[in-house]
Amino acid sequence: MTAVESREFHLAARPVGWPKPSDLALVTVTLEPGPDEALVRNTFCSVDPYMRGRMNDVRSYAPPYQLGERMYGGAIGEVVSAPDGSGLAPGDVVTHQLGWREFALGPPAAFGQVDVAPGVSLSAYLGVLGMPGLTAFVGLYDIAAIKEGDVAFVSSAAGAVGSLVGQLARMRGARKVIGSAGSREKVDVLTGELGFDAAFNYRDGDVDRLLGDVVGEGGIDVYFDNVGGDHLEAAITALNPFGRIAMCGAISQYNAESPPPGPRNLAMAVGKRLRLQGFIVSDHFGRLGDFMAEVEPAVRDGRIRYRETVVEGIENMVDALLGMLRGDNIGKMVVRVS
Amino acid sequence: MTAVESREFHLAARPVGWPKPSDLALVTVTLEPGPDEALVRNTFCSVDPYMRGRMNDVRSYAPPYQLGERMYGGAIGEVVSAPDGSGLAPGDVVTHQLGWREFALGPPAAFGQVDVAPGVSLSAYLGVLGMPGLTAFVGLYDIAAIKEGDVAFVSSAAGAVGSLVGQLARMRGARKVIGSAGSREKVDVLTGELGFDAAFNYRDGDVDRLLGDVVGEGGIDVYFDNVGGDHLEAAITALNPFGRIAMCGAISQYNAESPPPGPRNLAMAVGKRLRLQGFIVSDHFGRLGDFMAEVEPAVRDGRIRYRETVVEGIENMVDALLGMLRGDNIGKMVVRVS
């Protein structure tokens, strides 16, 4: 097997606050597949919010990136070569966790074959049909336990997870679907093509007031939290008795150097009998079959829509990550690397 | 039926911060039972943390006391007179919600007969075998879902609810039971007669550090929260993955004039997959039969112990309430009114 040259990112320094470009190094390596290894040319690499946490040297649900070592993350690509009898053949499309690089080299078991549906982009398997999609599905259905007639609110609603949360809430018979996002353009996408009933731009003022204005008298029953901070506090105030919060992330705090105050109104959870529950999608991979059975057909026939923000070139991947953390993207942010 | 004179408390003013004695008025009234009414001489009246919230004019799970009107709350007493065919007879012991007064007058259905077990005090039916006991049972079993081998932590552990939480945790096979309380004397009661494995006096310093010292490496699995504030923050730090918090109350905040900061570490709930759930005992009265079947025999045969703090005389009931809010009591605080 011929060796290939591949560029890949290594963690050069642990960021303090917002990552700087110099914290990540793009390194060229030569990869030579061993007899038991498959070689994959990555097409798209994913940038996801949880990657920021992995740059810190703290124990978390995902192990930290090691200083001076290669980074990794979700990716989709095509098999270049694979051992005989491995079940993989050149040209197969596979998803895997060996992203942040042009070529992935690993045991065949590290790669999962994808049967790409007609009319669906490859990159969708990193987004609406990938880990972010499963996150939305599990968080809304299993953690927040949404039911018909609920009023649902989701933050980061124009993001990869949030935009599916809103559409799944609608499919499950939510009475009203509300989203927040960080620009006028995103709000228009939410109430336009994504079919949210109401949305607001959280940069327009006090989140508590902005949410109150669109919620009106009825309150909310479910909050899918992607951001933490003032959104979480506003949601606790707006929640009806027996309301549920799926705590998926706290992107507003990922780059904070000291912890921000928690919700001052958390004690309301007693009187309102609220349930707040954190979750991590990797605990729920057993739901992947149910998820694909429900969501893939809906994506194929257009009942579920998705946006993507595609950054071209692995050399721009750090910018893509920073942009995603700033909220520059609409829908899933991916990087095309070949 | 002869009329009786009865003293009862009315809400004279809505407290700001800590209640003042002048906020409550002890008023003498004449009660004359109608043909369909039962008259009960109260023996013990209950003071409970939730009563402070009812003095505010805000919607909560319990409706507010009305200004100038009589107050109410849990009580136990003996039937003086009852309509024929009502199922009640003079001398019957009954519990009911017409406390804060010497005599209770109401329809027979307002009173529930109690079959007092030998060797158990009447007042126990306001505490370990009453609403606080059911609160401990439901919160620990149904909300926090304690299981064998868990490490359990409860705040206000020497109080009416907390002291049963610790003993029930032990009965359910907890690996370690930890409590916090507000005095050296209470800590000694916890680790002595109540059988806690470890306890600390939260006035001795930083709760986060005090808890960390007794928890050690293993972390905790369940936190039964009676106080909110820094205890809740410390528990979030100490909790193991998939830990559960039963949010029962936030006594540290009941007299606060402005909301204190929430837990700065709440975002940890995502990575640790924590569940925080508020609950109100009145949603769970369907569990009363299970509760009595498990706890009453254990109280009778001494496997479950209980302390009580008895204040003599209805004229001292406001002091009793304030003392309970300050934490002067060990075990259930009751007021003997006859």
Image (cartoon, coloured by chain):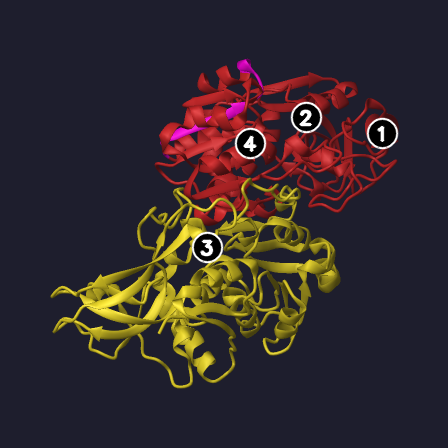
Chain colours: A yellow, B red
Q: Same chain for marks 3 and 2?
A: no
Residue B335 visible: yes
**Kind of residue at disc 2:** Leu
Q: How far apart are marks 1 and 2 (CA)?
A: 38 Å
SS type, badge 3: helix
Query: Could you say which disc has been placed on residue A21 in the image?
Result: 3
Q: Mark 4 lies on which chain?
A: B
**Kind of residue at disc 1:** Thr
Is A209 within the magenta? Answer: no
Q: In this view, does A305 lie above or below A202?
A: below
Could you say which quadrant of the image residue A102 lies in? bottom left
Q: Along the horizontal axis of the image, is A316 left or right of A91?
A: right
Q: Is residue A326 above or below residue A93?
A: above
Could you say which quadrant of the image residue A169 lies in? bottom right
Q: Along the horizontal axis of the image, is A23 left or right of A304?
A: left
For disc 4, the marked residue is: B231
* Start-end of magenta stretch: B173-185
Q: How crowded is mark 1: few (under 14 residues within 10 Å), some or many (20 or more)?
A: few
The residue nearer to you, when weighing A142 against B94, is: A142
Q: How far apart are marks 3 and 4 (CA)?
A: 40 Å
For disc 1, the marked residue is: B2
Q: Mark 2 lies on which chain?
A: B
